Image (cartoon, rainbow, N blue to C red):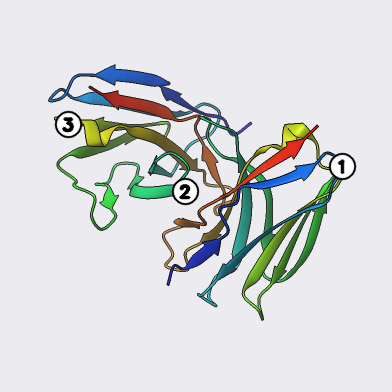
Amino acid sequence: QKEVEQDPGPLSVPEGAIVSLNCTYSNSAFQYFMWYRQYSRKGPELLMYTYSSGNKEDGRFTAQVDKSSKYISLFIRDSQPSDSATYLCAMISPSGTYKYIFGTGTRLKVLA
Amino acid sequence: GAVVSQHPSRVICKSGTSVKIECRSLDFQATTMFWYRQFPKQSLMLMATSNEGSKATYEQGVEKDKFLINHASLTLSTLTVTSAHPEDSSFYICSARGTGRTYEQYFGPGTRLTVT
């Protein structure tokens, strides 16, 4: 079993839709949770990070962490074609090395 | 702020040659740099972690003699792919962690290596 599981998609939605992206994980020691966006042939860029459980909102993006279920989500409201990208969840290894453990990424396509 | 650059952005080399990829933190000092490899439509796979002035720590299955990492300063790390083969063709991405918000890694734009 992988430490972090993420549906690879692809996920196609119409413009303006609410998008829900999810990851599950197995290690209850994870504390920091990140969402990165990666456009084709580019490096990942940080969208959101959360520490421990709860919600965090930034513009059209909301990140949710449910540690009891070992489940994290990223919601995108009013999705735009420019949101079309691969979304990667990442968690920091509790080993003290600051290593990230990435999900496989979900490819999202927002149709105009 | 927190910009990481990589050079070159893409490189094509012949089988058996060596290729060096540079990773620079432009506006902050990077205590730790990470090197990742990404195959098409797959996630990032961590290859190694390097701390300034120390030997790199390689992930299991990564050949340290083939992928030489040097982190000689707080703003520069290099990855040298030695005796490259076509199976080394991939997208290589570095990231850097500063001394402030210690959990956050800033990623470079990546280098596409093609070995013919």
The residue located at (52%, 37%) in the rendering is B107
Q: Position of residue A32 (x, y in %)?
A: 60, 63
Q: Amino acid at mark 3?
A: Thr
> Which of A83/B53 is in front?
A83
The residue located at (30%, 25%) in the rendering is B114
* Same subunit: marks 2 and 1: no
User: At numbered mark 2, what does the secondary structure look like: helix, strand or loop?
Assistant: loop
Observer-side mark, 2 or 3, equals: 2
In the rendered structure, the answer to whether residue B70 lies left or right of residue A44 reads left
Instruction: Please tell me how crowded label 2 is: few (under 14), some (14-19), or many (20+) other residues with Cα within 10 Å.
Output: many
- Identify residue for label 2: B43
The chain letter for the residue carrying disc 1 is: A
Instruction: Please tell me how crowded label 3 is: few (under 14), some (14-19), or many (20+) other residues with Cα within 10 Å.
Output: some
The chain letter for the residue carrying disc 3 is: B
Q: Which dot marks residue A16?
A: 1
Q: Amino acid at mark 1?
A: Gly
- Identify residue for label 3: B82
Q: Amino acid at mark 2?
A: Ser
The chain letter for the residue carrying disc 2 is: B
Q: Position of residue A30 (x, y in %)?
A: 55, 70
User: Could you tell me how far apart the alpha carbons at marks 2 and 3 are, in whole angstroms?
Assistant: 24 Å
User: Could you tell me how far apart the alpha carbons at marks 2 and 1 are, in whole angstroms?
Assistant: 27 Å
Residue B8 in view here = no
In the rendered structure, the answer to whether residue A67 lies left or right of residue A30 reads right
User: At numbered mark 1, what does the secondary structure look like: helix, strand or loop?
Assistant: loop
| Quadrant in which residue A40 is drawn | top right
Q: Position of residue B68 (x, y in %)?
A: 22, 37
Residue B7 in view here = yes
The correct choice, above or below, for A30 with respect to B11 in the image is below
* Same subunit: marks 2 and 3: yes
Nearer-N-terminus badge (2/3):
2
User: At numbered mark 3, what does the secondary structure look like: helix, strand or loop?
Assistant: loop
